[in-house]
Structures are given as structure tokens and as C-alpha cells.
Amino acid sequence: MRRTLAQIGFLAVAFLLTDEDLVNSQQSTTNVPSEIKTDAPCTTLHTKDEEPPAAGVSIVEVRFVGSLQMSVPNQDQIADSIKQQTRGTIPDAVKDEALERARAAWQDRGYFKVQVSGETKTLTSNPVSQNLLLIVHVDEGSQYTLRKITFVHNKAIMDMQALRGFFSIKDGEIFSREKIAAGLQNLREAYGELGYINFTAVPDTELNDEEQMISLKIDFDEGKQFYVSRIDVLGLDEAAKQELLSDLPIKHGQIFSSRLWEKSLLKYASTAPDCPCRLYEPHRFDEHSATVAVTLDFRPCSD
């Protein structure tokens, strides 16, 4: 029996550039695309008439029912997590989120095929808040352990031991959806650092119900390796631009490393205003030529 976990991948916003951005190494790194205006600060629009806030919906009590193998302390831990993390303004949406948290928590403890359903009861209600009791019906199923993780169609990183090291879960341990998701995130970050910004990894899950074990075969789609075609700096004079470009962690013509881009943003976060009126992406991707143009904007905001 095979099931597929949710695909974890990094999806980039496509923005068409010309092929000259990559091949013309003499192009200035401070050119500003025509769609970005630099002669004035951006202006944030304010809405005068705002609706009053909806009543806050909280889950203040959780009960699990069913033939449960999970220990009571673990059940209490899950209930506390649901009460602390689940909030909203629509009761049905809050209930659905809480049930998904319960299902994920059981899967994190090896109950991969768990089924949950539930209902809520209102304990207290007033114009500003509504407190709910959540009753969760749990059909645990079997508890599974991890047999092994294998990888296919990987080319940029061929070291299987290194790939396996991105997953903290060991063979023979209780299967955990959370640890698998964290491992997939580690893969995405590693490939992103190498410029594979469209990298995806899809786990094919094979269950052995007799032995209560799970094997994962992770299929890689690495995509293209992207390079930095242009770095645009807005709101600084020429001398300040050149000084910034020389000190910037990410460089024109190099592999587009997502780690270095994040480091670049953090380095200047305190001096570059975060204006909600910025309508363009700080990085723009050209899928055809596998290039990225990035923008650092130091222009002031205007209320």
C-alpha cells in the first residue's frame, strides 16, 4: 500500500527578463527596471471605515475519545498544544484547525493512518469572545516505525549519507511526520543554497502493515541552477550604492544562494524601510535563462 505525503517545495514567482541579463557581464548592477519608479516615496493608503473586530473563538477544553493506546501524558500534551495554538473568529474554521493539529500530533507519534473527527460545544459566549469544548474522536490504527529512507534522481548532491543526514529521524525509530517535514525543509535549504530555487522533493510512502514499518523513497526534481543577473539598489546616491554592493554578501554573476540572499536582507533590514506599498517582488526570476534580479530599496515610506 502506497501513500504520498504533501509535496514540499520552493515555488518562485516568475518574472520575464531578457537573456542579455546573464550573458552581458558588463551590464551595470545598479540599473533600475522601468517598472520601478524612483523619483518619489511610495504612499500607503488608509481605510477610513473599518468593520468592528469579530468575536475571538478559543478552545479551552479538549477531550479525546476512542480506544486509545497513546499514553495519557502525551494526550494531555496534545490537548494543551491545541488550546494554546488554535485561535480564530469562525467556530467551524477553529474546529477544523484543531482537528488537523490533533491528527498531525498522532502522526508525529507513529500513528500514520490515524483518523479523527469531532464536534464542539460552546461553554461561554459574549460579544467579544467564545470559548469552546472540543471533543475529538480518534481511530488511532497501528503505530509505525521507520524502516529506511532512500533518494532517487539526485544529481547536485550525490552523497547519500549526506542526504540522509538532513533527516534527524533514525531507522527503527517511531515514525514522525514532523521530523520528515523538517528533513524535507533541510533539503530545500541545502539546494536553495546551491542555486536550485525550484527544487522539490516528493516522498513516496510504502507501508508494511504486517511489520508496522514505513519506507520512504524521496524523488528529487532539482530544476535549474539559478544565477544573479542584476542587483538593483534604490534610494541611495552612487557612492553609497557602490559601497553597499562591495559589502553585499550576494554578488552579481554568482550562483543565487537563498542563504546569502536572506543574509543580505538581514544585513540591511534596519536601514531599508519595510513599506507595505511596495508592489513589486524584491527578487524576480527568469525561468528560461535561469537568472534572478534582486532589488534592495532604501527609499522612504510616506503615510
Image (cartoon, grey):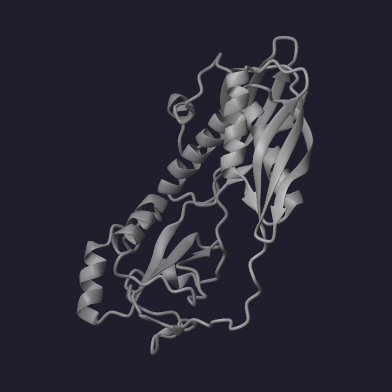
* Direction from residue 6 to residue 148 in the image, left or right: left
In the rendered image, residue 45, in percent from the top left (x then y), is placed at 53, 83
* Direction from residue 293 to residue 178 in the image, left or right: right
In the rendered image, residue 240, in percent from the top left (x then y), is placed at 22, 76
Q: Residue at x 55, y 69 (%)?
A: 15
Quadrant of the rendered image containing residue 29: bottom left
In the rendered image, residue 275, in percent from the top left (x then y), is placed at 43, 74
Residue most extreme to the top: 211
Residue 273's place in the image compared with 214, above or below, is: below
Q: Is residue 10 visible?
A: yes
Q: Residue at x 44, y 51 (%)?
A: 195
Q: Nearer the viewer, residue 184 or 108?
A: 108
Residue 26's place in the image compared with 56, above or below, is: below
Q: Nearer the viewer, residue 193 or 210?
A: 210
Which corner quadrant holds the C terminus?
A: bottom left
Residue 81's place in the image compared with 42, above or below, is: above
Q: Residue at x 58, y 20 (%)?
A: 73
